[in-house]
Amino acid sequence: MLREDRAGSGLIAEAERTTCLDGSGAADDGRGPALWCLSHARATGHTGFRRTRTDFFRVSCEAL
C-alpha cells in the first residue's frame, strides 16, 4: 500500500529553463518557482520552462 506522507514536507516545486538549464531551486510551494520563471523570461526573453513537482509517500507491506 502506498500512502501520502503528511508527516514531513508537503509538495516541493521547482522550475528549470529547458535550454540554458538555469533554475529556480526547490520551494515548498509553486509561487517561488513561478515568479522566478516570470522574472527570468522578462530578463532573457526565454519562454520554455520545465516544472517539477515532488511529493512524498510511505509504503506498507503488511497486507502482502
Image (tube, grey):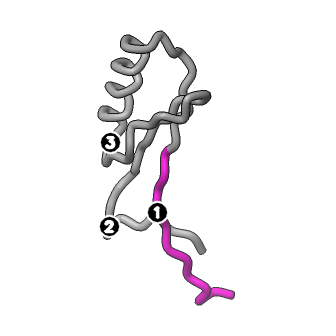
Quadrant of the frame with the C terminus: bottom right
Would you say 62 lies left or right of 8 here?
A: right
Q: Earlier in the sequence, mark 2 or mark 3?
A: 2
Q: Residues within 10 Å of mark 2 (few under 14, many from 20)?
A: few
What is the three-letter code of the residue carrying label 2? Gly
Q: Which residue is under mark 3?
A: 29
Total numbered labels: 3
Residue 45: image x %, image y %?
47, 10
Question: Which span is picked out in magenta?
Answer: 53-64
**Which residue is outermost to the right?**
64
Q: Looking at the rendered structure, which numbered label has been put on residue 8?
A: 2
Q: Looking at the rendered structure, which numbered label has been put on residue 56?
A: 1
Q: Earlier in the sequence, mark 2 or mark 1?
A: 2
Give the answer, above or below, for where 56 lies relative to 11: below
- What is the secondary structure assignment of the residue under circle 2? loop
Q: Earlier in the sequence, mark 1 or mark 3?
A: 3
Residue 23: image x %, image y %?
44, 37
What is the three-letter code of the residue carrying label 1? Phe
- What is the secondary structure assignment of the residue under circle 1? loop
| Quarter of the figure with residue 63 | bottom right
Residue 27: image x %, image y %?
33, 46
